[in-house]
Amino acid sequence: MFRPKGPVCQSCGMPLSKDPLGGGSNADGSPSSEYCSHCYRKGVFTQPNISAEEMMKLVEGKLRSMHFPGFLARRFAREVPTLRRWRGRVTSQAARPRPSELQPRA
């Protein structure tokens, strides 16, 4: 399966290289190496109360609006619960990635 080169946002999965602002920002104004500017600004999440499942829906919708085929949009959205922001949080069975999708990144 295709994997983006370089780091991805640990909240939504967007490649940080695609972020128009180059990534989010920490509280001190320094660039965040973990989160994109859509998810993280000035050291806080832009949507602090969003759940992993809601983020999955948001990601899938955004990818579909960018003309990604539905199967790819769903595939990338299912990665969300594996990202650092969501690890250890309870998600529904439907939101959990399938074991075959948890291959280590090269």
Image (cartoon, helix red, strand yellow):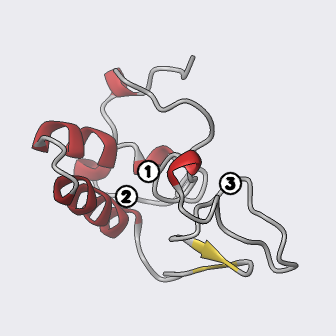
Outermost residue toward the right in this view: 28
Image quadrant containing the C terminus: top right
Residue 81 is marked as 1
Q: Which amino acid does label 2 sit on?
A: Thr
Q: Which amino acid does label 1 sit on?
A: Pro
Q: Which amino acid does label 3 sit on?
A: Glu
Q: Residue at x 31, y 69 (%)?
A: 54
Q: Is mark 3 on a helix, strand or loop?
A: loop
Q: How far apart are marks 3 and 2 (CA)?
A: 22 Å
Disc with the residue nearer the chain's start (1 vs 2): 1
The answer to which of 86 and 20 lies nearer the viewer is 20
Q: How far apart are marks 3 and 1 (CA)?
A: 15 Å
The mark total stands at: 3
Q: How far apart are marks 1 and 2 (CA)?
A: 8 Å
Residue identified by numbered label 3: 34
Position of 63 compared to 4: left or right?
left
Disc with the residue nearer the chain's start (3 vs 2): 3
Q: What element carries label 2?
A: loop
Looking at the image, do the residues carrying marks 1 and 2 touch, with CB atoms under 8 Å apart? yes
Image quadrant containing the N terminus: top left
Position of 52 compared to 19: left or right?
left
Position of 46 compared to 62: left or right?
right
Residue identified by numbered label 2: 91
Q: Residue at x 64, y 58 (%)?
A: 22
For disc 2, the neighbor class at 10 Å (few under 14, some 14 to 19, many from 20) is some
Position of residue 50 relative to residue 20, above or below, is below
Q: Quadrant for residue 27, please give it.
A: bottom right
Position of residue 86 relative to residue 51, above or below, is above
Q: Residue at x 37, y 58 (%)?
A: 91
Q: Residue at x 47, y 49 (%)?
A: 13
Q: Which is in the foreground here, disc 3 or disc 1?
A: 3
